[in-house]
Image: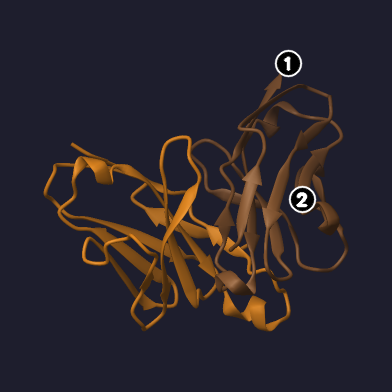
């Protein structure tokens, strides 16, 4: 099956620093990648959608200048949390979608999820 | 607007007994519905998905779900729980109105007692 990796799996940083999280599709080309945030014992909240080679589309309420997303290739998207603060501590999860599935009539877009990155800002 | 309601935040069953995780959805268009499972420190795994084909969907690990349009439900079931089924389960809806973004329910934590 399709595999998505994330790096690092967990990171601890000081307040005010920036942290970059990588999301890679290992065995397929991801035309679209998604970034989610999951608070403890809560559901996943979509932060943004990124398409390869274009600017990310952010959900309402998500600061695009704080959460920088780059999708430079069909297998890599990065999320950079800039000037991190304790309230940014969370579990960040990416997912990747292969457009070919949608064109093939799969319908119901199937996203393949990474294992997540736990960020703790001190 | 689309939404998903998982009626139970926690479900506890004994090993070997049936599992029922409830999910109701709201969608303006023909939805696609999914169940994902999240084990601790692991990524979300797709259990099954409904995409307007057969209303009874069979997934991995013995799970299945039935799409009932009249009841706007998509409950997840398994005849016999295994200890390894203990995890967090998310019901998810997607449709054209949401630009096919995944809308997650709040999750149900399944506990399996020996």
- Neighbourhood count class around disc 1 (C-alpha, 10 Å): few under 14, some 14–19, many 20 upward: few
- Residue labelled with disc 1: B114
Q: Quadrant of the N terminus of chain A?
A: bottom right
Q: In the drawing, what numbered circle is on residue B74?
A: 2
- To the question of a shared chain for discs 2 and 1, the answer is yes
Report, in whole angstroms, how far the alpha carbon at label 2 lies from the one at label 1.
Answer: 27 Å
The residue positioned 59% from the left and 48% from the top of the image is B105
Q: Between residues B5 and A38, which one lies in front from this camera angle? A: B5
The chain whose colour is orange is: A
Which chain contains the residue that carries disc 2? B
In the rendered view, tell whether residue A86 sits above or below residue B33.
above
Q: In this view, does A104 lie to the left or right of A70?
A: right
Relative image position of residue A63 (x, y in whole percent): 27, 62
Q: Between residues A29 and A32, which one lies in front from this camera angle? A: A32
Q: Between residues A29 and B4, which one lies in front from this camera angle? A: B4
The chain whose colour is brown is: B
In the rendered view, tell whether residue B2 sits above or below residue B41.
below
Relative image position of residue B37 (x, y in whole percent): 63, 44
The residue positioned 50% from the left and 65% from the top of the image is A26
Which numbered disc flags the more N-terminal residue, 2 or 1?
A: 2
Viewer-nearest of discs 2 and 1: 2
Q: Between residues B77 and B31, which one lies in front from this camera angle? A: B31
Occupied quadrant, residue B20 = top right
Mark 1: secondary structure:
loop
Q: Is residue B57 visible?
A: no
Q: Which residue is farthest top?
A: B114
Which chain contains the residue that carries disc 1? B
Q: Which residue is farthest left?
A: A16
């Amino acid at each position: 099956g399709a595999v998505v990796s994330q790096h690092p799996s967990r990171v601890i940083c000081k307040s005010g620093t920036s942290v970059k999280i990588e999301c890679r599709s290992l065995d397929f080309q991801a035309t679209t990648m998604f970034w989610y945030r999951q608070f403890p014992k809560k559901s996943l909240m979509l932060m943004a959608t990124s398409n390869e080679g274009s600017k990310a589309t952010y959900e309402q309420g998500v600061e695009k200048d704080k959460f920088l997303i780059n999708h430079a290739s069909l297998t890599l998207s990065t999320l950079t949390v800039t000037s991190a603060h304790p309230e940014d501590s969370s579990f960040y999860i990416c997912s990747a979608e292969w457009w070919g599935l949608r064109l093939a009539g799969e319908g119901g877009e199937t996203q393949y999820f990474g294992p997540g990155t736990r960020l703790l800002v001190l | 607007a689309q939404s998903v309601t998982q009626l139970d935040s926690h479900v506890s069953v004994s090993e070997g007994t049936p599992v029922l995780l409830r999910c109701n959805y709201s969608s303006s268009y023909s939805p696609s519905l999914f169940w994902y499972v999240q084990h601790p420190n692991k990524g979300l795994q797709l259990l099954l998905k409904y995409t307007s084909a057969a209303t009874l969907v069979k997934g991995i690990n013995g799970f299945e779900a039935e799409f009932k349009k009249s009841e706007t439900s998509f409950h997840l079931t398994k005849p016999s729980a295994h200890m390894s089924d203990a995890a967090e389960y998310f019901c998810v809806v997607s449709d054209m109105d949401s630009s096919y973004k995944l809308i997650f329910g709040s999750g149900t934590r399944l506990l399996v007692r020996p």
